DNA sequence: ACATGTGTTGAT
DNA sequence: TCAACACATGTG
């Protein structure tokens, strides 16, 4: 539901807001005036709060805690920031100040893809830095370049490429055939040193140690995955740790499967990951064994709903921890 | 000094 | 979940 339709800015009155209460209690002539002059005007927009300097803050709540979306010069800007966050955080259920994005409108669909192929923390970060529109436009440019040009922009991508799902041209970085320990109980993926140092360089701290960090990847369905990436001195290895086991589980990764890594070829250097498609013959084997399409059936049974609720799959206690971390933007880089 | 964002509370 | 309010913290 769109608030604007019910009680939009034009329909709302900016009266009351407690000022009359102050006057009722006024016995002299100074106190009420002082209180009234201190009082900040409340906003007509959801998720928008006044700031002492006349600017406007935007905030959204998730699991009992506030996520600050930044400050803006005017209410409407703050309200638009709230709307973007609400649609990223709450999907179709989001209540927005202005007309919500619609899957049917092509331009809206592009923004929805843009929103949902980024983590919540990234969206919040863009809103706080006021770079959301810039990045959205860049993303749309990259998309049209990837889909209208069959030539120089993306020579390796023919039509029918699975990468079309995310609409972004990519350059292949490397593949890794996962080992038994990569998909076992160690909950980590070893990135071959050669590839790690070439493509995922780690910052070195003051003491010379390599700083771990959180990295976002997008898979072929547009889902965002966040892994901790660090260097283990004990084994002299670069590894993906936190978040990796969930990827293994959801992708049904088995030893010997190949995981491919890509980087966006466009202006935004985003990272992509997915399991290389298994041979069709293998899929037929599964179907013959069980008489159903196991992949689709599994998907439905986990979600308990339909495809739009893919994120529900990850709504586990573990994810809640991850998102608590993600909420704190100062922790975008792990310690 | 001033802007930004958080701690906290009470309401819905 | 939400915004109001006070004020601590960040920033130039």
Image (cartoon, coloured by chain):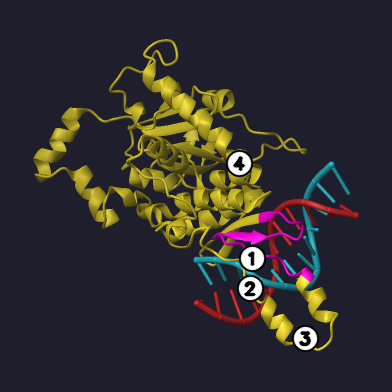
Chain colours: A yellow, B red, C cyan
> Residue A71, image x and y in percent?
67, 51
Q: Which mark is residue A213?
A: 4
Disc 2 or disc 4, which is closer to the eye?
2
> Residue A144, image x and y in percent?
42, 23
Check disc 4 and report its element: helix, strand or loop.
strand
Which is nearer the N-term, disc 2 or disc 3? 2
Front position in the image: A294 or A181 = A294
Q: Are marks 3 and 1 in contact (CB under 8 Å)?
A: no
Q: Chain of mark 4?
A: A
**Labels 3 and 4 share a subunit:** yes
Q: Are marks 2 and 4 in contact (CB under 8 Å)?
A: no
Task: Say whether residue A272 is magenta.
Answer: no
Q: Which residues are magenta?
A: A37-56
Residue beneath disc 2: A17
Q: CA distance from mark 2 to mark 1?
A: 7 Å
Residue beneath disc 1: A42
Image quarter in which the N terminus of chain A is found: bottom left
- In this rendering, position of residue A247 left or right of residue A76: left
């Amino acid at each position: 539901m769109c608030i604007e339709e019910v009680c939009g800015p034009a329909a709302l009155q900016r009266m009351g807001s407690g000022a009359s209460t102050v006057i009722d209690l006024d016995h002299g002539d100074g106190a009420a005036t002082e209180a009234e002059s201190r009082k900040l005007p409340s906003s007509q927009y959801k998720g928008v709060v006044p700031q002492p300097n006349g600017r406007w803050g935007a905030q959204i709540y998730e699991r009992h805690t506030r996520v600050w979306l930044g400050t803006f010069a005017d209410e409407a800007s703050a309200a638009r920031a709230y709307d973007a966050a609400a649609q990223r955080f709450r999907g179709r259920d989001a209540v927005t100040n202005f007309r919500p994005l619609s899957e049917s409108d092509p331009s809206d669909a592009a923004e929805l893809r843009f929103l949902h192929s980024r983590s919540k923390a990234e969206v919040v970060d863009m809103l706080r830095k006021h770079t959301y529109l810039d990045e959205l436009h860049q993303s749309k440019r990259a998309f049209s370049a990837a889909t209208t040009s069959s030539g120089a922009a993306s020579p390796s991508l023919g039509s029918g490429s699975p990468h079309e799902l995310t609409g972004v041209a990519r350059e292949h970085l490397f593949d890794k055939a996962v080992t038994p320990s990569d998909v076992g109980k160690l909950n980590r993926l070893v990135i071959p040193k050669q590839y790690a140092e070439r493509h995922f360089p780690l910052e070195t701290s003051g003491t010379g140690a390599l700083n771990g960090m959180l990295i976002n990847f997008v898979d072929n369905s547009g889902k965002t995955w966040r892994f901790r990436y660090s260097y283990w001195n004990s084994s002299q290895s670069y590894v993906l740790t936190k978040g990796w086991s969930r990827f293994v589980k959801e992708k049904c990764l088995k030893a010997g499967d190949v995981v491919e890594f890509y980087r966006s070829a466009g202006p935004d250097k985003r990272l992509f990951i997915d399991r290389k498609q298994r041979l069709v013959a293998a899929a037929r084997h599964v179907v013959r064994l069980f008489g159903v399409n196991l992949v689709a059936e599994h998907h439905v049974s986990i979600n308990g709903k339909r495809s739009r609720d893919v994120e529900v799959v990850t709504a586990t206690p573990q994810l809640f921890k991850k998102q608590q971390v993600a909420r704190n933007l100062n922790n975008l880089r792990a310690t």
